Image (cartoon, coloured by chain):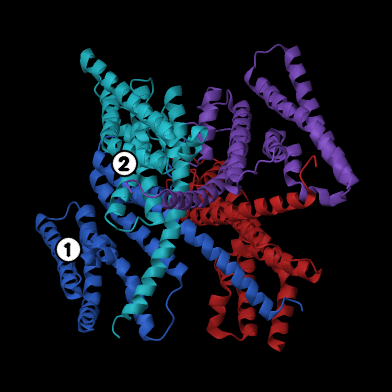
Chain colours: A red, B purple, C cyan, D blue
Amino acid sequence: MDEVSRQARWEQRTEIPLAFASLLFLTMYAILVLAQDLPGAWRDLCTAVLSLTWAMFAADYGVRWRLSGQGLRFVPTHKLDTVVVVLPLLRPLRVVKVYEAVQHRHGEPRLSLYARVITYAGLTTVLLGFACSLAVYDRERGAPGTEMHSFGDALWWACATLTTVGYGDVVPVTAGGRTIAVGLMACGLALLGAVTGSFSSWLVQVFSLESDRENVEGPPGS
Amino acid sequence: MDEVSRQARWEQRTEIPLAFASLLFLTMYAILVLAQDLPGAWRDLCTAVLSLTWAMFAADYGVRWRLSGQGLRFVPTHKLDTVVVVLPLLRPLRVVKVYEAVQHRHGEPRLSLYARVITYAGLTTVLLGFACSLAVYDRERGAPGTEMHSFGDALWWACATLTTVGYGDVVPVTAGGRTIAVGLMACGLALLGAVTGSFSSWLVQVFSLESDRENVEGPPGS
Amino acid sequence: MDEVSRQARWEQRTEIPLAFASLLFLTMYAILVLAQDLPGAWRDLCTAVLSLTWAMFAADYGVRWRLSGQGLRFVPTHKLDTVVVVLPLLRPLRVVKVYEAVQHRHGEPRLSLYARVITYAGLTTVLLGFACSLAVYDRERGAPGTEMHSFGDALWWACATLTTVGYGDVVPVTAGGRTIAVGLMACGLALLGAVTGSFSSWLVQVFSLESDRENVEGPPGS
Amino acid sequence: MDEVSRQARWEQRTEIPLAFASLLFLTMYAILVLAQDLPGAWRDLCTAVLSLTWAMFAADYGVRWRLSGQGLRFVPTHKLDTVVVVLPLLRPLRVVKVYEAVQHRHGEPRLSLYARVITYAGLTTVLLGFACSLAVYDRERGAPGTEMHSFGDALWWACATLTTVGYGDVVPVTAGGRTIAVGLMACGLALLGAVTGSFSSWLVQVFSLESDRENVEGPPGS
């Protein structure tokens, strides 16, 4: 029980700084990719901050692993945390848990299952789409034959890919860009599954609730 | 009970005028976008009617809010009404409720759950597709390098986007057009989820009903 | 009971001729579209056979309506038959019912629900894809700027559309072709829903059955 | 029981050699397609090894058929094995069964239903995508008007097709390549159904398990 409370105290204290650190991480990466004409000293600073924030995530993961006292069982039971260390861009996903903890303390009910799935899927889509746009734009910029002339083109391409629309007016042409693109496609497919599955279940639920509510209120004109 | 009946009376009296107003709203917007060579005076008239109908929707929303006596709880419990004020193009969605109220008064059973989901999803698709085609065409017309030369091209693009086919022969090239397009893609994804989920459930139901019916009638040749 | 048996006798006697008639209908339409350099007399003959087979379907529908003695209730309870009169290309869908009737007479169990859904969806896809390819090719042939130079291109386009892949290397450019294409996209979306829904349910069933079977047989090496 | 144990012994002894043979099969086919400037003698050797491995799969199938003593009922009850003989590229799919048998012997629980579906679908996607890329590249290479200049282009095309994104920047233009492409599209649709269906079910399960776990551990900060 003491282990759990020490763990909980650690999470409570680090949550807010780490949420800011994740935003800093994303901002630094975006600056490094988009502001090409920045003086070298500033770029070095950004790289340093980027490494530092990542080191913070790794350190936080290590501390929580030790406090948990679970040994190797920690990794499979904390999948989201593990993914966050490898892909710090997804760190803001933890915001959902923090929001729920806050709501719980105020005695309010937690989010419904479908609201959580939609929130996780939506946040993942936005963060992954933004990060992949940056990474692909970084590789495509100036490649011969590319149609990706601005970061706006990269965002447009990411949206068309994540929704599996795939116009093909803007596509990556370099090997690096295409490799990241395949990852984004796979995520798009998974997110499509999440959205399709949960949206349809949610829709069915909403309609049944609505019909119950109408029955209680009585039909219009009665 | 008195509150409810005043609310119901208000809804009964405003339903028909507001349904016409929503059609007027769509028509005025379409005229403004498509009839570019209209004399200035006519265009001003259309703009005035457009603003007026929107003001009517806002006023109707305000009156119903006050009559409900619910305070801030009105917004989350009347999501469709709130969306309609922001996007008056979706107003005709209320037609489904009116149709059900009419059927209810005649003592007929309400639509099945799947019929309602399909009706809502289908109507939303048609209205959003039409409105987004207008909005995108308005921004793309005459843009350098665009392939969207007529409103027919815009409609064709909207259909290919909503079904996530995405040929890419006609695509928006301006920032404004692409922003609207991303919204349409997201709607397409959501509608795909609704259609996929409800269609498959409906299909399974139809087949079970059919097999029951055949068992009652006896097989052919018996 | 007498009504039912007269209806059943009629269906038994007309099933085989009408199945051949539907194949004849498809063949005549394909000949009219693909064999452009046929002498006029032959083309007139094909048109005549086409009209005759369609008249046969309409007559069969009328006779079955009268025999049913159901009045207007016949239309909603025989949806597939009604669709077949409007779109005779879908007539071969009735083959599934005939196959099941034959199996029933031999005392074999009917197809499982998922097998039937997959069969209907697959047959509809093949028939609609083929018919729409013919209709679109008929309109696109020789249109300025088209990439659809052969019937093979049209088939390739129909496959890419029905699976919602939508490469966009071959697309309809005429208003008529695009109108049919929108219908095909909508069918593709519906069929995607059917395939996705039933395939995933079927997959889950198969795996549970397989695991039951393994438990009965014992694991390998035991 | 004797039949079963002889069958099990045969499967145990052939599993490892046949797993290597399937990798050999894939490698030989890849070499034949990709290494065009190989001396004729080496190519003949590859062809010979390719035929030999396929003959091994056929022989294994025949032996197991006889040992089963099931007659014609063997084919419908061993669908995966039958598919493997026709498409030896899918042989590695049996790895899942071997993995489960090994885990079973060590007393560990078998994979959950969703893990198995995802594993099968993922493996099938990777193997089919790789094999179809090879087959399509073999047909497209050097075709007039093709954009598929390297095997990397073919892999990129296969990924965009399997996820139904379909950019259309690289598409097959020959009749042979398009025929294989239609097969890949159909597989993509089926795999989309599998991923969508199982992912959404799995997601729902994960969230319910997570909420149970949180309830047991107590909320953070309590």
Quarter holding the N terminus of chain D? bottom left
Disc assigned to residue D54 = 1
Q: Can residue C31 be seen in the rendering of this structure?
A: yes
- Amino acid, disc 2: Pro
Left or right: A4, with B207 as reference point: right
Residue at 58 percent across and 38 percent down: it is: B122
Q: Read off the chain for label 2.
A: D
Q: Earlier in the sequence, mark 2 or mark 1?
A: 1
Left or right: A8, with C78 as reference point: right
Q: Which residue is mark 2?
A: D172
Q: Quadrant of residue B47?
A: top right
Residue D92, position in %: x, y? 30, 67
- Badge nearest the viewer, 2 or 1: 1
Q: Is residue B218 above or below residue C135?
A: below
Q: Is residue B121 above or below residue C27?
A: below
Residue D91, position in %: x, y? 27, 65
Q: Can residue B146 be seen in the rendering of this structure?
A: no
